[in-house]
Image (spheres, helix red, strand yellow):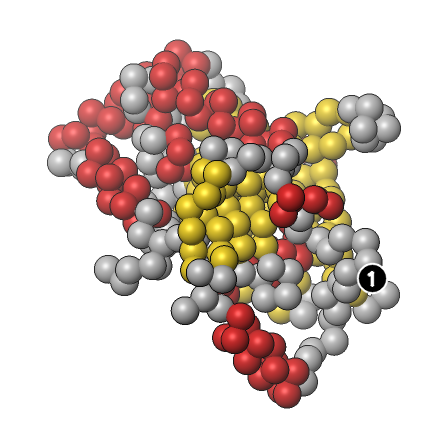
Amino acid sequence: MIKGLSITPPVLGRISIGRVIERNGKRLPEKDDQFTITSQVQTKEGWVIHPLDEVLRKNSPNGKLRSIPVTLLFNDPDLNLRAKYSLFDRSNGRPLCVGNGETCRRVTSAGIQTLPCPSTDSCEMAKGGACKPYGRLNVKLGDDDELGTFIFRTTGYNSIRTLAARLHYFKAISGDMLASLPLELRLRGKSTTQSRGAPIYYADLTTREGMTLDEALTQAQQTYARRQALAFNQQALDTVAREGFGNGAFEDNPDDALDVIEEFFPDRPGEAVRSTEKPSLNAKLDKIAASAEGAPA
């Protein structure tokens, strides 16, 4: 295994609430009131819709996808949902600091160091909204690939808090059979004083529509027993995944980093917003050279 490279679950596609649109020659995030399932391919028109999106949307009221049947890959809630305070370099998309409220890994002139993490309220680097809670949830859709996942990324407190609670609760009541439960990723809306009465949407995790908790637990027991008979080792899978996540300083793939910045960490006032105009070759080479000079040895 290559040291320093975080080994993450195979990703087949993306689940999002919202999209990035072009406005006045700039690409800006826009919120939505439904899920969208896309492939990992992006064109100038945006992310290519995954075939599963159309299949699930046909059975949705008004054609809006607000619930998705899912299962989980791991029994450990913290492997399915990784949520950390995250600060990115907006010029190249590289993570600069990732923490959990107690400790953080931060890029410094002396290399990557482990330092105290005071959370976003007390950290000097977090001023101006530069650092946010950033969560990544991996779920399985369909039965075509037992180890392939779709990733849902979010910087919303409501989504992160609700998903974390549900995962830990379901693990507890199922007797550590979280990966066997038939679940549903569901979109919920709420209004707050801060939103001035306008609805804001967040992700929740529930049992499947039309299925009681007792029925979901019964099905989980049956799935677990069938896997045991086939020598499916869930504990070993969780252990290998945990080691893979810990193999790198940061989880995020550099190839995806700029897209993450664009969608979830839009530029603050006074900073340049990513333009739709393609940079010249010289500009790209200059940026690569500047990044190399500033990278730690």
Please provide percent x and percent y for residue 294: 53, 70
Q: Residues within 10 Å of mark 1 (few under 14, many from 20)?
A: few
Q: Residue furthest front?
A: 110
Relative vertical location of residue 189 with respect to residue 98 in this rendering, above or below: above
Please provide percent x and percent y for residue 105: 45, 48
In the image, 12 versus 171, the foreground residue is 171
Point 52% across, 29% down: residue = 163
Please provide percent x and percent y for residue 77: 39, 30
Point 39% across, 12% down: residue = 214
**Amino acid type for the residue under numbered disc 1:** Arg
Point 58% across, 61% down: residue = 93
Q: Is residue 274 left or right of residue 187?
A: right
Relative vertical location of residue 97 with respect to residue 79 in this rendering, above or below: below
Is residue 84 shown to the viewer in this render?
no
Please provide percent x and percent y for residue 281: 62, 87
Q: Quadrant of residue 156?
A: top right
Q: Residue furthest bottom?
A: 282
Q: Quadrant of the N terminus?
A: bottom left
Point 46% across, 43% down: residue = 115
Relative vertical location of residue 104 with respect to residue 202 in this rendering, above or below: below
Q: Residue furthest top?
A: 214
In the image, 274 versus 209, the foreground residue is 274
Residue where numbered disc 1 is placed: 23
Q: Which secondary structure lies at badge 1?
A: strand
Q: Quadrant of the C terminus?
A: bottom left
Q: Is residue 105 left or right of residue 46?
A: left
Is residue 134 shown to the viewer in this render?
yes
Q: Is residue 3 left or right of residue 138?
A: left
